[in-house]
Image (spheres, rainbow, N blue to C red):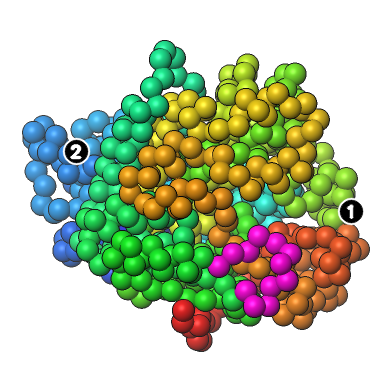
Amino acid sequence: MCGIAGIVDLSGAPVDDDALRRMGEVIAHRGPDGAGEWSQGPVGLANRRLAIIDLDPRGQMPMAREGLWITYNGEIYNYRELRTELERLGHGFTTGTDTEVVLFAYAEWGADCVAKFNGMFAFALWDSRCDELFLARDRYGIKPLYMAQIGTQILFGSEVKALLAHGALRARLSPRHLLEYFTFQNIFSDGTLFEGVRLLPPGHHLTISTVDGQLSERRYWDFDFAEPGGRVDPREYEEELDRLFRQAIHRQLVSDAPVGAHLSGGLDSGSITAIAANALPWLPTFTVGFDMRSAGGLEQGTDERAKAEAMSYLFGTEHFQAVLKAGDMERAMPQLVWHLEDLRVGQSYPNFYVSRLASKFVKVVLGGAGGDELFAGYPWRYYRAVVNQDERQYIDKYYGFWHRLIPNRLIGSFFATDVWNEVKGVRTIDIFRNVLSDRPTPQTPAEYVNQSLYFEAKTFLHGLLVMDDKLSMAHSLESRVPFLDNDLVEFAMRVPVRLKLRDLDKVVKLNENTIGAKTEQYFQRTRDGKLLLRKTMLRHVPKELTKQVKQGFSGPDASWFRGESIDYIERELLRSDAAIYQFLNPDGVRPLVREHIEGRENRRLLLWSLLCFEHWCRIFLSRTPTPTPPPALASTVSPG
């Protein structure tokens, strides 16, 4: 696991080695175990190493073999099997790293090598045999890879700040993506808040030729949820899920550095911990909870420390925990936004703190991301749009649900005049629809559920993965996601919907007009989702854990924003010189903030996003060419 950066100049001009060095230095937190740069003519590669597999210095990067140079970030969990195959084909290895496996795999199979990798990765590989740079990102987007073109130069890196450190790229806001962010609290396209900076999409690779300047981008994999044909035996599905789930976890325990696991008190992390603890006695586990004494009962914030402690006792783990109070979010925000940079999804400061806690004891941590998206953990979302006259009606319903922040009726008054004039012609429903542009039209309620699973894997899950990468690597911690094992994902996409959701037939019988807020609240309180996973995990976890209602990883922020943190909210968002008002209309924003403070609406998600954007503007839109990181936190969170 590492941080990568680099430059390729299509004009053939030599790389600026000082700029390349700066690009690597600014992401030093991603790899404190080693640094390296290499350049040759129009291409330069930089790397910061977090040594996980084969800690020998010979594993340093950039690494060269057979006329190929690579800077690589990730872990290939089937690297041993691939190494055996490549050795039979005549390739000689000198290290035990998976980096060397990636190099020889490309030498043997070219661009098709990525289809053989079971893991998470983003890498850049220079092929001196044909003067081409090959960039690739894993199937699911676990590891990010940002790009920008400035004149004839293409810059790339694990983080946007690496691109900014080059010096040729200045941070400017993208109004189109600001609209996207304040509509969905996410960015569904491949853009970012930084004008001209994009993410290479998950499951894509890109070849850049310095001979003719051609760029060739191709998608090599995509999610494909579909109903299976033929007879369905639930017992066979349970057996196969159990086998594949255990296999995935054992694959992802491979490491020459200490490994731990997040343990939130829920089914996904509890199941991972149960199996991992059998393989690694005294597995370190980590939980962050919340001081609920000042919560007013106005939202879904939960403190799962007691549940996590009980599971730790049951599974025999070495458990560590911390408790967050109202002021801890405020304290972390400058550092958090500096590392997050590419703003996405909801309240993530708990993720920042739990990664900080885990990094004190391990270099690798297992997490439960993907379980809900693969096995249908959010039934109240899917049930909103299972009865439709046609696909257009489905789009309208689901688009309405994913308006997380500002509805269309308010969006015109929310932005400053200059920004609104640039974006008023952009239809966010078209951005939404484009996610599904290559998908066949659903015909049945089950197919509409699978369409929703596809959409959320491409958008919501991707946002979670980008956030998790940034906030774990902020603390030099590798975060692994066993649910996103290739074999397990391929299986999950073929599980019949009726083995995932209990009440689909009941919902179909309801008049579609009755599936509103009350119906969604009912299904939020049920255990309808993830049926197959719940039933299978009875083999590994207590029965009561499989019967829990789905809960998110969030604190009592709605109450804190009205109570203990109200001064912070007013100071950051209501003052006349707030940085956000370069781009937002204070007369449109302040009333929404006051609605929350006065208890008339719960706008905690909007307030979080406004706070993040305020710090983003201060940090990245400064006049300095390379933004400098805020001071590190001076004290620790309260011990549990």
Residue in the image at 64% along x and 78% along y:
293
Q: Residues within 10 Å of mark 2 (few under 14, many from 20)?
A: some
Distance Cα–Cα, label 1 vs label 2: 56 Å
Farthest residue in the top direction? 230
The dot on residue 29 is none
Residue at image point 27% right, 59% down: 277
Give the labeled residue for mark 2. Answer: 82
Nearest to the observer: residue 533 or residue 97: 533
Q: Is residue 613 above or below residue 230?
A: below
Q: Is residue 318 visible?
A: yes
Magenta stretch: residue 299 in it?
yes
Q: Does the segment drawn in magenta span residue 283?
A: no
Q: Which mark is residue 413?
A: 1
Q: Residue at x 45, y 48 (%)?
A: 546
Judged from this view, the residue extending furthest toward the front is 543
Q: Is residue 592 above or below residue 353?
A: above
Quadrant holding the N terminus: bottom left
Give how far across and how far down residue 137 sits, in percent.
Answer: 41, 43
Residue neighbourhood size for the residue with mark 1, other residues' Cα within 10 Å, grouped as few (<14), some (14–19), many (≥20): some
Q: Which residues are magenta?
A: 292-303
Near-viewer residue (10 or 109): 109
Image coordinates of residue 606 in percent, x first then y, are: 74, 59
Query: Residue 536: horizontal and vertical position, in percent?
Result: 38, 40
Percent of width and height locating residue 37: 32, 61
Element at label 2? helix
Magenta residues, dominant SS class:
loop
| Residue 139 higher or lower than 268, as above or below | above
Residue type marked 2: Leu
First in sequence, mark 1 or 2: give its number: 2
